[in-house]
């Protein structure tokens, strides 16, 4: 009889060992995935057992109809503090359960500090996953001076906004009513360069409306009066500013460059601006740029209403999206007798200006 008791005792011990080393971890792994590598054998057994004891609590939302709420993880905050606040805020049912799951999976080591939008309609496993990526609710969308519409669209895939380049190009063909005072044909020229802080959920129409309102906000009565003084309506001023933007490297030269084009317009002389031809040529697939450079003699003969070497006056629409500096230069150009300018030979980005063609030729690089 004694041998039987000893056998049963040993069997019980081996059964416990089997459960501890094999069955319990295996069941936890099937239900919750493999344990974190750094966990010791005893920790794996302990946390596996605790997770199994929690039953379905980890996969059951606290409130399927619960509303979203903001939650912030502070830099350096402990995991136990995070889980305790989640329970206190009514996002999860039990802080200890979520803590065990985070430690078991190793996700406790990868919680990110930052702001989150969480909901009690999510399970604790889902919330653990959410806490790995502190994605901001808002993202900055930057429009650079001198970009044409296609370049703005090309920046969308990496912007954080769920708007395709094609959707922007399509929506931009119909300017919002807020721009009616300028009567633009499309949004080209009216994407005011700026950094826009937008919700990630912003739609393409909301983006267009936001940018258009920003443009309208910056066209003050003073600026409009300046355009009128140059004999330009707002749309014409944007066209001129778009050329000035592409011709200028140093912003301080914009008013002087604007004066050259105003002087030419006043005598019916062609503007002779390379960027207008670059715009007409479109995308250069060989060099992967929208702004072909350098231009050849054949390019200068390219027949397009945007070719300001062939056709006098302003092109039919803006060729880029000008900055407020360029718009201001179009409204308030310097007073000059210049009709020509060309880049200096020193690579500084500045230009040499001339009143006559002879002076212009003499300014050429040797």
Image: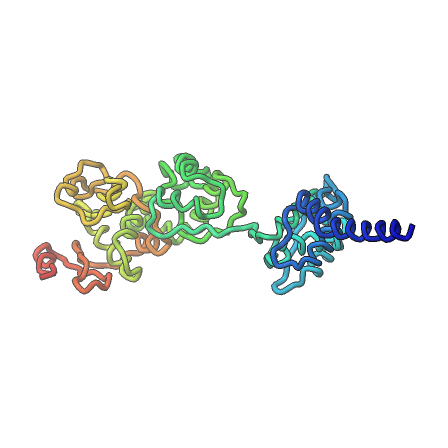
Q: Residue 324 is drawn in which quadrant?
A: bottom left
Q: Position of residue 130 (x, y in %)?
A: 62, 49
Of 267 and 354, the residue lying toward us:
354
Q: Is residue 331 above or below residue 347?
A: above
Q: Position of residue 212 (x, y in %)?
A: 44, 44
Of 345 and 47, the residue lying toward us:
47
Task: State the count of labels.
Answer: 0
- Name the quarter where the C terminus is drawn: bottom left
The reply, left or right, for residue 162 in relation to residue 261 is right
Q: Which residue corresponds to the image point at 23% horizontal and 51% vertical from the top-left?
A: 262
Of 84 and 170, the residue lying toward us:
84
**Residue 160 visible:** yes
The reply, left or right, for residue 356 in relation to residue 194 is left
Q: Which residue corresponds to the image point at 27% horizontal and 60% vertical from the top-left?
A: 253
Q: Which residue corresponds to the image point at 47% horizontal and 40% vertical from the top-left?
A: 163
The reply, left or right, for residue 212 in relation to residue 88 is left
Q: Residue 59 is drawn in which quadrant?
A: top right
């Amino acid at each position: 009889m004694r041998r039987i008791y000893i056998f049963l005792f040993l069997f019980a011990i081996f059964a416990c060992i089997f459960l501890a080393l094999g069955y319990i971890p295996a069941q936890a792994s099937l239900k919750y995935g493999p344990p974190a590598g750094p966990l010791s054998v005893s920790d794996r057994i302990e946390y596996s057992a605790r997770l199994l004891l929690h039953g379905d609590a980890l996969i059951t939302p606290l409130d399927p109809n619960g509303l979203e709420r903001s939650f912030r993880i502070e830099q350096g905050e402990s995991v136990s503090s995070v889980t305790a606040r989640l329970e206190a805020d009514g996002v999860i049912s039990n802080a200890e359960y979520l803590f065990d799951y985070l430690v078991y999976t190793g996700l406790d080591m990868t919680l990110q500090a930052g702001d989150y939008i969480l909901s009690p309609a999510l399970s604790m496993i889902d919330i653990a996953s959410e806490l790995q990526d502190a994605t901001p609710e808002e993202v900055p969308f930057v429009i650079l001076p001198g970009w044409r519409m296609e370049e703005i669209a090309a920046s969308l895939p990496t912007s954080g906004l769920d708007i395709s380049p094609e959707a922007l190009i399509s929506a931009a063909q119909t300017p919002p009513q807020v721009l009616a005072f300028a009567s633009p044909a499309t949004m080209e020229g009216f994407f005011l360069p700026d950094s826009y802080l937008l919700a990630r959920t912003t739609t393409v129409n909301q983006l267009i409306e936001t940018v258009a309102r920003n443009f309208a906000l910056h066209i003050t009565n003073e600026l409009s009066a300046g355009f009128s003084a140059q004999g330009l309506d707002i749309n014409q001023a944007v066209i001129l500013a778009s050329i000035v933007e592409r011709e200028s490297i140093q912003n301080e030269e914009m008013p002087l460059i604007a004066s050259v084009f105003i002087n030419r317009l006043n005598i019916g002389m062609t503007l002779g601006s390379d960027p207008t031809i670059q715009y007409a040529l479109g995308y250069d697939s060989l060099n992967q740029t929208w702004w072909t450079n350098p231009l050849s003699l054949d390019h200068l003969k390219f027949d397009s209403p945007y070719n300001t070497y062939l056709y006098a006056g302003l092109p039919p629409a803006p060729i880029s999206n000008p900055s407020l500096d360029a718009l201001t230069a179009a409204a308030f150009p310097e007073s000059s007798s210049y009709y020509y300018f060309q880049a200096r030979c020193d690579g500084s980005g500045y230009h040499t200006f001339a009143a006559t063609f002879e002076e212009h030729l003499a300014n050429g690089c040797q």
